[in-house]
Amino acid sequence: MTSNGRTLLFVLSGALVVGGIALQVTEGQGIGLFILAAMVLIGTVFDAGYRGRNRAAHARWEKTGERELDHETGEIVEVWYDPVSGERRYESAGSDPTAS
């Protein structure tokens, strides 16, 4: 999950807590919003991307056969793909991300 996605979910859970407090004070029925806020927070905190798992260490990189010109450096890069995570890497032609 991206940092913007995490921020959005933290803001959403905060809004749910505030709504739950308001509903609990006025109607006495805000427990549902508290439970929903807790589920959003738990899901966000325990997301693998949030915990910073090093997925690259377990990646199985495959060469796609695509080659492109890196306009910043002027060198040719090859595209590598991890079928498990869907991540793509752009490495200098001739380098091998599986060796690291």
Image (cartoon, rainbow, N blue to C red):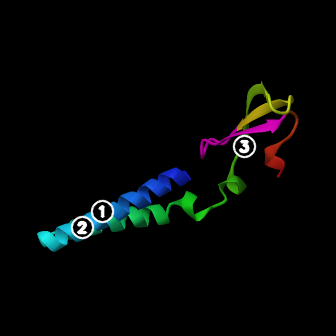
Q: Which mark is residue 61?
A: 3
| Residue 74 image-quadrant placement | top right
Residue at 43% across, 61% down: 10
**Tag 1 near tag 3, CB within 8 Å:** no
Which of the two discs, 2 and 3, labels the residue nearer the N terminus?
A: 2
Query: Do we see residue 44 in this rendering?
Result: yes
Per the image, label 1 sits on a secondary structure element best described as helix
Residue at 48% across, 51% down: 5
Disc 3 crowd rating (10 Å Cα; few below 14, some 14-19, many 20+) is: many
Disc 1 crowd rating (10 Å Cα; few below 14, some 14-19, many 20+) is: many
> Does 89 appear in magenta?
yes
Q: Image height check: is 32 above or below 79?
A: below
- Which of discs 1 and 3 lies nearer the camera? The answer is 1
| Residue 33 image-quadrant placement | bottom left
> Does 68 appear in magenta?
no
Residue at 33% across, 65% down: 37
Q: Where is residue 60 drawn, in percent x and y? A: 70, 46
- Which of discs 2 and 3 lies nearer the camera? The answer is 2
Residue type indicated by callout 3: Trp
Residue named by callout 1:
16
Disc 2 crowd rating (10 Å Cα; few below 14, some 14-19, many 20+) is: many
Residue at 60% across, 46% down: 85
Residue type indicated by callout 1: Leu
Between the C-alphas of marks 2 and 3, the distance is 46 Å
Q: Image height check: is 23 above or below 79?
A: below
Residue named by callout 2:
20
**Tag 2 near tag 3, CB within 8 Å:** no
Per the image, label 3 sits on a secondary structure element best described as loop
**Tag 1 near tag 2, CB within 8 Å:** yes
Position of 16 with respect to 85 (left or right) is left
Highlighted range, magenta? 81-92
